[in-house]
Amino acid sequence: MAYHRHIVLFSHAFLISVLLPTMGNASTAQPDHAYNLADTTFVATCSFVVMLMLLPGLALFYGGMARSKNVLSVLTQVFSSGVFIIALWMIAGYSLIFCKGPWQPVVGGFDKVFLQGITVESAVGSLPEYLYCLFMALFATITIGIIVGAVAERMRFGAFIIFISLWFFIDYIPMAHMAWGGGWIAPLDILDFAGGNVVHLNAGMAGLVAAIMLGKRQGLGTTNMAPHDVSMTYTGGCLLFVGWLAFCGGCNYAISGLSILLMLNTLIGGAGGAIGWCFAEWRYHGRPSTLGIISGTIAGLVGITPACGYVAPMAALAIGIITSIACLWSVNNLKKRFGFDDAFDVFSIHGVGAAAGGLLTVIFAASLLGGTGYPQDRNIWEQMGIQILGISFSMLISAVATYLSLALTRRVCPLRVEEDEEALGLDLGSHGEVAYHTDRIGSD
């Protein structure tokens, strides 16, 4: 079929780019740098733990929410998003985000493509540059891995690989550069300590657009689509909770009292999210659920991500509680009202959660409430205006970039699997294997 040829050509192009020779890595002379051993050890440890957020944390979290006939496809998409984006990051992503280029306000340059010019002596602050590159690569992999939850159970695997590759260049690289690499957003001093906009809001909006463009799963509303293994989701959620401490704590790039506050606020924010979702669900549905408490924890962690470096610990609790209630409202009302099939509530938890957390950051960063106050001697209204600008811009760019990425992908191959494959299950249809051997092939 025609789209199979396109997939093969894409694969060949990808491999050729990986195998192109790099220049200067081993021989480029660099001055010696005295790395801070404590900082290096701390951030390296955070990197290992953050890696567990994606693999196996996010994979298990999503895998348990899938139907049994699709669990392997979800695990495979999360894993593949990680390995493909790691490769693209090392080829060009790191350079285009953190090097200066002719279009500096929007995107960086090509000085460090294929990591050329970086050696074991290179440094970023008190860290080896290789470690900084590694840590930031994990942020990219997690961002794109989150999107899997919106397109689960119906997206063609080949289309998914092409889509995330395009989205990485069209969306993630410019967004990350504008916020972290010296682009035009950085001087605005938006209060976003650990990637609320670049990671969570970005992924949440991408999930919404992708879910709308893909359309609903077959049988939605009439077929039982309950999670096939909540214990798997629970395990993945616990790994995400643990990893999130390193995700936020490592963003100080040093071991200090602030790093510990980041971890403490993250812990408290996640706990607040679980508490808020638990009692809200208890109130409106008559009983709290395991899936709900875990989902609330993730919502609270999303909400505290932009705020963790600016607020006091008790404010983190409030942010977690309020954010999780906002996310639950989106799941129960916004999603149903507009009828989009965001399979695992990526937009409701990551999109709504990041927007709520970003706005709450401004409120609880007030010095009156024990926060750090506002940059450039702003008052709360001035900072809130800047915050709304940053959130709105991030939502717009993500929506447009996701549409373009999917539209381009659709010109290469269909986005969705065939109807009979979707009914059979993507595990068997797309990968030729099943997670659980039973007598009923393709059962839900």
Image (cartoon, rainbow, N blue to C red):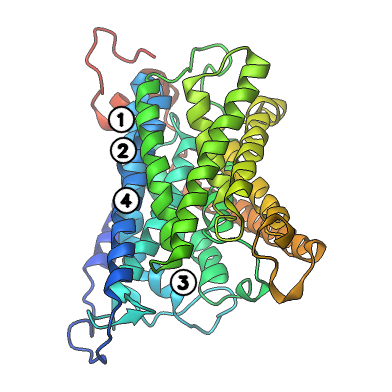
Residue at x-position 23% and y-position 92%: 29
In the picture, measured across the screen, residue 401 lies left or right of residue 84, that is: right
The answer to whether the residues at label 1 and label 4 have Cβ atoms under 8 Å apart is no
**Three-letter code for the amino acid on which mark 2 is drawn:** Thr
In the picture, measured across the screen, residue 102 lies left or right of residue 443, that is: right
Which residue carries the number 3 mark?
97
The answer to whether the residues at label 2 and label 1 have Cβ atoms under 8 Å apart is yes
The answer to whether the residues at label 3 and label 1 have Cβ atoms under 8 Å apart is no
Which residue carries the number 2 mark?
76
**Three-letter code for the amino acid on which mark 3 is drawn:** Ile
Q: Which of marks 3 and 1 is nearer the N terminus?
A: 1
**Three-letter code for the amino acid on which mark 1 is drawn:** Leu
Q: Earlier in the sequence, mark 2 or mark 4?
A: 4
The answer to whether the residues at label 2 and label 3 have Cβ atoms under 8 Å apart is no
Residue at x-position 51% and y-position 20%: 218
x and y, in percent, of residue 169 in the image = 47, 62
Viewport quadrant of the N terminus: top left
